Image (cartoon, rainbow, N blue to C red):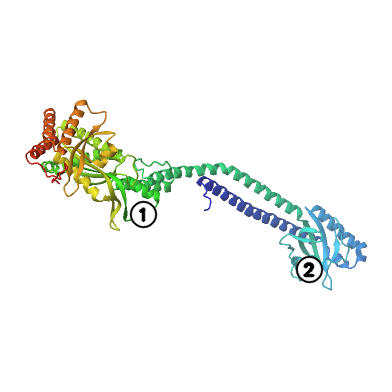
Amino acid sequence: MPKKLTLKFTLISAFCGLSLIGSILLTVITSYEVKSFIREQLRLRITDTANIMATQIDGELHQSIQTVEDDKSDAYIKLKNALQIMREHGTGIANAYTMRKQENGEFAFIVDGSEKDQNATGDIYPQSSVTPMLNSALNINSDDKSPRSETDIYKDDWGVWLSAYAPIFTKSGQFDGIVGIDVSAQSIQDQEFKYIVTISSISLVCIFLMMPLGFVFASRIRRPLEALTTEMEKIGRFELNDEIFVPTRIYEINRMVQRLESMRRGLRSFEKYVPSDLVRDLIELGRDAKLGGEKKNLTIFFSDIANFTSISERLEPEKLVGFLGEYLTVVNDALSQNQATVDKYIGDSVMAFWGAPRNVENPAIKSCQAALECQRKINLLSQKWQSNGLDVEFKTRIGIHTGDVIVGNIGSETRMNYTIIGDNVNLASRIESANKFYGTSILVSETTHQQAKKRFVMRLIDFAVLNGKSTPIRLYELVGYKGDMNKNQLYQIELYEKAFHFYTERRFPMAIFLLNRLLNKNPFDYAAYLLLERCEKYQLHAPSKDWQGEYILEVK
């Protein structure tokens, strides 16, 4: 996988890179324009100079010089002196000379007034060094009197030059040759190079000076983007409670923040419909929800409001919904605080479980804690309503069972629910319903009791065959935390369990004796009253020989 680059490094690199490219382009364009301007101005100047020099040359004298023997003539000396004077008065002129085209087509020097390396009359100009412009200048007709200059710097056997040529005419108008002047271009090239180095140095300095600006610019973009990334990571973890705040003046980032906030609000609403832990697991695993389930040992929780039908009949629907909303909120809080997965609300009933989608340590203990907390918070809620003059009180029945179930995404390909199914789910529901028969608030199964009995006080209520089942199970009433019970409460529990022991051994008189003692102390113990009634019945009509203490519970 290619190495990832940080945004800060990328922005600063891009900023400096663009500055470098801009500086290079500026250097190239400026250098070209300056070079073109300097050369054009020099070309015009030396063209004018050559033309002036040509007008100062006496065509007849020039025509009289034909061979090397003429180098001693007065005409030659006069023309050479004139060329040298004009060369010396010109700026930067290295060579001033006249040339003529010979009959054989070669170009020969006639008078050479150069500063050094002078050519004698008749010396042939090397054909390899003849430029198109020089060739054009020596092949003009008598009607063309315009001077010419090289369009660019050229190199020959004597150096690097920029040259201009002007025609020499006799008084009769006959073309006899040209005046040529050469300006050394080495100084021009040196100046151009110096200019390029200067511009490049300035550009590099500008780049280094721009780096702090690039850092500031990158930081102004990076900081809000990093903050935005942090908020997106929170949403990725399904942490949706905090408001998104990303300070920036950049319009596009503000729009991203607005869209992210809209997504957060939507997901926060969505969170109310599905278990948050489930969504977090799917996000962390990076996969879509698919139909399917697995067998797991979970602790299951059902709750229901006692006499809810009669309560709903005497309340207006709007008020009922309000009361129910407050009630379900406190139940949900108690469950969530104890790591439960709240599966669904079925009217006034709540279904939850522990151990999926994430494993929970001591799920049976967590479920009992949640049940006791539910009862505590519901009692406080009812007291609040009554203190406000509202004749409303919710009493809740809770059933808890631990067993194997199928947990997963149940439903269709287009609509599914993360839930649990199986016989043990039905059994947990039946345990909750059994509270109505025994007059209890929280009943748990024997499997839950075994896992939580060290932490809580529980009373064995019955050995019952629940409605729709064929196998009896022990039911325990969850009374409270160990350490919170007083001696009188513990004594009453002891009396009941001893009575139940005598009941299962068919020692009904002893059981009746203990139950009467218990009811004298606590006449509101409805479970004790039921067991007493059953013992009295069996004392008169003994159960079958294969009876082992079970009781068939027909209530749903």
| SS assignment at label 2 | loop
Q: In the drawing, does residue 202 fall left or right of residue 107?
A: left
Q: Nearer the viewer, mark 1 or mark 2?
A: 1
Q: Quadrant of residue 541?
A: top left
Question: In this view, which residue lies farthest toward the front?
Answer: 545
Q: Is residue 520 above or below residue 544?
A: above
Image marks 1 and 2: residues in contact by CB distance under 8 Å: no
Q: Position of residue 425 (x, y in %)?
A: 24, 48
Residue drawn 21% across and 26% down?
Answer: 487
Q: Is residue 168 visible?
A: no
Q: Quadrant of residue 528?
A: top left
Near-viewer residue (435 or 13): 435
Q: In the drawing, does residue 452 fall left or right of residue 319?
A: right
Q: Position of residue 294 (x, y in %)?
A: 32, 52
Q: Which mark is residue 264?
A: none
The kind of residue on which mark 2 rests is Leu
Label 2 crowd bin: few (<14), some (14–19), many (20+), radius 10 Å: many
Residue drawn 41% across and 45% down?
Answer: 233
> What residue is shown with label 2?
138
Q: Which mark is residue 288?
A: 1
Question: In this view, which residue lies farthest toward the left?
Answer: 540
Q: Position of residue 82 (x, y in %)?
A: 85, 58
Q: Is residue 499 visible?
A: yes
Question: In this view, which residue lies farthest toward the top?
Answer: 487
Q: In the drawing, does residue 288 fall left or right of residue 380?
A: right
Q: CA distance from mark 1 to mark 2?
A: 88 Å
Near-viewer residue (460 or 128): 460
